[in-house]
Image (cartoon, grey):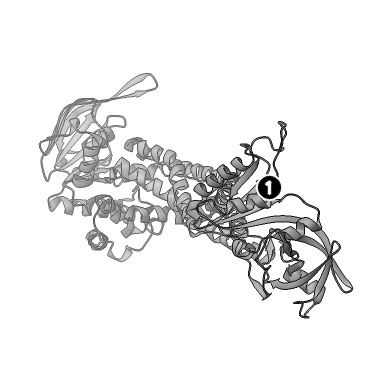
Amino acid sequence: MIRLEAISRTFVVGTEPVHALRGLSEHVRPGEYVAIMGPSGSGKSTLLHIIGCLDRPTAGVYRLDGETVSELDETALTAIRREKIGFVFQSYHLVGRLDAAGNVELPMVFAGVPRGERRSRAAAALEGVGMAGRTRHRPHQLSGGERQRVAIARATVMRPAILLADEPTGNLDSAAGQQVMAVLRRMNAEGLTLVVVTHDPDVAREAERVVVLKDGRVGRRLTGSELPASGSGK
Amino acid sequence: MDLLELSLGALRSHRLRSALSMVGIAIGIAAVLLLTSIGEGTRRYILTQFTQFGTNILAVNPGKTDTLGIPGVLGGTTHKLTLEDAEAMRRVAGVDKVVAVAMGQARVEAGQRGRSVPLFGVTPEMPEVWKFRVRQGSFLPAGDLRRGAPVTVLGPTLKRELFGSENALGKFVRAAGFRLRVVGVIEPKGQMLGYDIDDCAYVPVATAMRMFNLDELIEIDVLFHHERLADSVARGITRRLTQRHGGREDFTVTTQTAMLETFGNIMDVITLAVGGIAAISLLVGAIGILTLMWIAVGERTGEIGLLRALGASASQVHRLFLAEAAVLAGLGGVVGLVAGLGLAALLRAAVAGLPVYTPLEYVLAALVVSVCTGLLAGVLPARRAARLHPIEALRAE
């Protein structure tokens, strides 16, 4: 499904080139649950952005479902983001003036889904993350865990094949974090491919595979159960 | 249309500043609407003043004002306009009726009362040419134009001043040493550019020339069969009169349509100029919206990044901000429209006689202009929003 071949990504900061990724290769099969770990600056977020078609590699080939994404133009990438990929962010990124249902409807607005269908699909998606009773609440009226579940409903309402999560539990206490991870785990069990960037070994341990990045390359590949029991995931 | 809903939501979340920048456009639209309404009202007012004489009419005056302004300045004789000239015009193709006009000012007296008014010496066809109607009696009798019967027809204001509600028909008035019998009273015609055209008397043209010792006419008015004939009749009259005046075009032919056209053009330019000055305030309003939207893009960078991540295309983001600016200006336009129309109505009520007229096209144009202003003001901010790189935008939050 996701095939990354020798991906490099170089940013220019000032006059200095910064190599965020240096020839990284990785495959993700449909329905997999992969955690990406690694120290700050090891290229985790950059990798996630490239997988999510928000960014392009400077070198290397990215194939998604057999399509060579690294050659596509911005319009085509937008379509892929809309149809195939869902994003969940550490800071939720909910639109403050819209209520929960309005936030979940957003991607459908851009996809041109008719209003009636949007309403019912948003309601169903919110119910799926246990937020059926909070559809009319605005983000500031919700707890962090609730906000992240609204964000997950929004990321999955277009029924993408892949969900990309960047530190989804980073701003949550452990109880709320576990609730959020339970939702993600269940969606993965229903067939959603899950790629999670995390610092938290408890989150990573639930993954089938853990990819540890180091200096823009894959440092180690582990299974979730091979991770140490706590703490030193960094 | 769903994008529009999103735009509206964004505006609602900043009610005060949205309202304030709307006020800018509203003031501009109201000013443009009001001033152009006054211009248009004035134009219509003056046009109706002139067209009360009809549009299939032309006037011949002595002297060629088109070229030098002063007749006969190049030497040689300047021919006067005479009754014979007027008679000759009758035979030009397309001409229906001709009125020869001589004029003088005199004190008209009846019994103890008297009043100084203009006396017009005219030919009997005057009522049809000038669109006057006779209220009492009849107009000046037809017959030999050169004979000049001692009769007069009074304007209604003069009649009232001299005779009150009494019957004036058959009575005599004195003017410039002449004793004139009143044969008719004209129906009121009202004012022309603030001048009471009912306060005068009419006498046969030969009588007037004798009373005031005149040897020329001040004007010959020609009624022709149809408005469309204006040019051909004007040419025919010019040719005939030039011939009669020994090959010199020492007179001026003015068709009513040409005059109205010239006048209309002048008014259009004035209206445009005044509207243009008012449009400056519209421009200021547009800059207000531009500023607001520019700031909004900066504030909502994170949101823009999110929308891009959710699958919004650059052009959708572009449209989103453009729509926001257009809605803002459009609403401002509606407010300005209501304010402008209200002020116009208020002006009409407060200043009696001030001609204010707002055609429906102006109302529609005001709405279109305000929305277009918003679209224009939104172009730069919307482009800025659309060009943001999704990742950098996301990082902004």
Answer with left or right where residue B192 lies relative to residue B24.
right
Does B60 sit left or right of B182 as displayed? left
In the rendered image, the vertical position of residue B382 relative to residue B210, given as above or below:
above
Task: Look at the image and tell me whether residue B14 can be seen.
Answer: no
* Residue projecting furthest to the bottom: B166
User: Which residue is nearer to you in this view: A179 or B2?
Assistant: B2
Measuring from the top left, give residue A101's x and y in whole percent: 31, 59
The amino acid beneath tag 1 is Leu
Farthest top residue in view: A15
B153 up-or-down from A13: above or below: below
Q: Viewer-proximal residue, A14 or B141?
A: B141
Give residue B245's quadrant in the image.
top right
Number of callouts in the render? 1
Using the image as rendered, state which of residue B152 and residue A61 is in the foreground: B152
Which residue is nearer to you in this view: B286 or A35? B286
Residue A22 at x, y = what percent?
22, 24
Which residue is under mark 1? B81
Residue drawn at x 49%, y 52% as measured from the top left: B229
Which residue shows up at 21% across the image and 38% down it? A76
